[in-house]
């Protein structure tokens, strides 16, 4: 039961929070107000990747409030992606101005825009002049190598009617090192006219309490890795509690459901094991001995052995 006015968004995590994950997560846990689909972009030959298109098919996203995201280097890529998503009927599209990986930034995508406020302004003017029947929101970091990039970007963004701005207060060059800086968020909130969503390093109730000491008014948070480590986090932050045994049973059911869905979707034990093993890099963090859990998973050479390993891991929870 929700006991506070928190709004929680599921962050897009490419390779993890796909439509299968969203379905199982919302069936077994939920507590998320909006789900962001990992970015859609051109693949080879400046064509939209087929595997990414499947992620935004309306029939794969009917039951939940989802927002697709676009990663783009220029107007052509942006308009192509937005056109597809508008055709599919999406009412909000998120612009990725935060992806820190050189594979993206070297091509002028993601966080690379944070160093080009003038080019961004021109591109956004062009975008809004197309009259697309949809709303836009933005997800960004504080800068490429310095948070001094941000004020000029905020000034540009203030000139457009974005529905909200999701801000991860780290620079791209930090990747995931150090800590997200709530003070940077507070400064941003004083400059930005749009509603703002905090994103970064929210892993527990204690983290939320600490954030609230710096940002007492902030009620809207996006969670990425914390939700993968512990899918009960959004509901817990909203005030729900479980007996440890009950939660353990719920986690096991969540896992089993995820395995079942991927077994239907993926072909061959190898692919299924690889997928589940990726998830365990996060799941294992909520177990007392993450290293041991990961080792047991990695050592499983087939699904039978994997199932036995999972039973053993959950016995230790
Ligand atoms: C494996 C991985 C994939 C990600 N994919 C995306 C993506 O597609 N789009 C995006 O905006 N951010 C992406 N992110 C960033 C997250 O959405 C989020 O901003 C970041 O993890 C910080 O939030 P957290 O501390 O709650 O995890 C990704 C992060 C990770 C670790």
Image: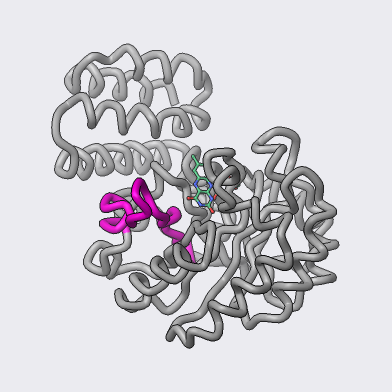
The part of the chain drawn in magenta is 30-55
The residue located at (68%, 44%) in the rendering is 172
Q: Is residue 196 left or right of residue 265?
A: right
Q: Position of residue 210 (x, y in %)?
A: 77, 49
Q: Is residue 190 above or below residue 51?
A: below
**Magenta highlight on residue 46:** yes
Q: Work out whether residue 25 can be spotted.
A: no
Q: Work out whether residue 302 can be spotted.
A: yes
User: How many marks on residues?
Assistant: 0
The residue located at (43%, 86%) in the rendering is 133
Q: Nearer the viewer, residue 178 or 130?
A: 130
Q: Nearer the viewer, residue 154 or 123?
A: 123
**Magenta highlight on residue 236:** no
Which color scheme does this rendered protein use? one colour
Q: Which part of the image, by quadrant, shows the C terminus? A: top left
Q: Is residue 164 above or below residue 110?
A: below
Q: Nearer the viewer, residue 234 or 250?
A: 234
Q: Is residue 105 left or right of residue 180?
A: left
Name the image quarter holding residue 186: bottom right
Q: Is residue 32 above or below residue 304?
A: below
Q: Is residue 210 above or below residue 189?
A: above
The residue located at (42%, 19%) in the rendering is 293
Name the image quarter holding residue 316: top left
Q: Position of residue 105 (x, y in %)?
A: 59, 46
Q: Position of residue 265 (x, y in %)?
A: 18, 44
Q: Nearer the viewer, residue 104 or 180?
A: 104
Q: Position of residue 48 (x, y in %)?
A: 33, 57
The residue located at (22%, 41%) in the rendering is 262
Q: Is residue 203 left or right of residue 81?
A: right
Q: Is residue 317 left or right of residue 311?
A: right
């Amino acid at each position: 039961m929700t006991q506070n006015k928190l709004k929680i968004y599921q962050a897009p995590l490419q390779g993890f929070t796909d439509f299968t994950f969203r379905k199982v997560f919302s069936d077994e846990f939920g507590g998320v107000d909006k789900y962001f689909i990992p970015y859609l972009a051109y693949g080879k030959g400046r064509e939209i990747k087929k595997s990414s298109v499947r992620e935004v098919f309306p029939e794969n996203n009917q039951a939940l409030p989802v927002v697709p995201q676009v990663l783009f280097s220029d107007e052509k890529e942006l308009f192509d992606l937005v056109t597809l998503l508008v055709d599919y009927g999406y009412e909000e599209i998120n612009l990725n101005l935060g992806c820190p990986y050189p594979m993206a930034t070297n091509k002028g995508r993601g966080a690379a825009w944070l160093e080009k406020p003038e080019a961004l302004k021109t591109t956004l003017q062009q975008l809004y002049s197309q009259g697309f029947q949809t709303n836009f929101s933005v997800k960004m970091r504080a800068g490429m190598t310095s948070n001094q990039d941000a004020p000029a970007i905020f000034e540009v963004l203030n000139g457009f009617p974005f529905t909200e701005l999701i801000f991860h207060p780290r620079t791209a060059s930090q990747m995931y090192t150090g800590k997200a800086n709530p003070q940077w968020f507070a400064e941003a909130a004083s400059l930005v006219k749009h509603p703002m969503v905090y994103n970064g390093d929210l892993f527990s109730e204690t983290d939320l309490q600490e954030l609230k000491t710096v940002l007492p008014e902030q009620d809207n948070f996006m969670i990425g890795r914390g939700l993968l480590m512990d899918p009960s986090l959004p509901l817990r932050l909203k005030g729900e509690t479980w007996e440890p045994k009950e939660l353990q049973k719920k986690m096991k059911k969540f896992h089993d459901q995820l395995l079942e869905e991927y077994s239907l979707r993926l072909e061959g034990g190898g692919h299924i094991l690889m997928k589940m093993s990726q998830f365990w890099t996060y799941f294992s963090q909520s177990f007392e001995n993450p290293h041991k859990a990961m080792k047991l998973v990695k050592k499983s050479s087939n699904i039978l052995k994997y199932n036995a390993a999972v039973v053993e891991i959950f016995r230790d929870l």
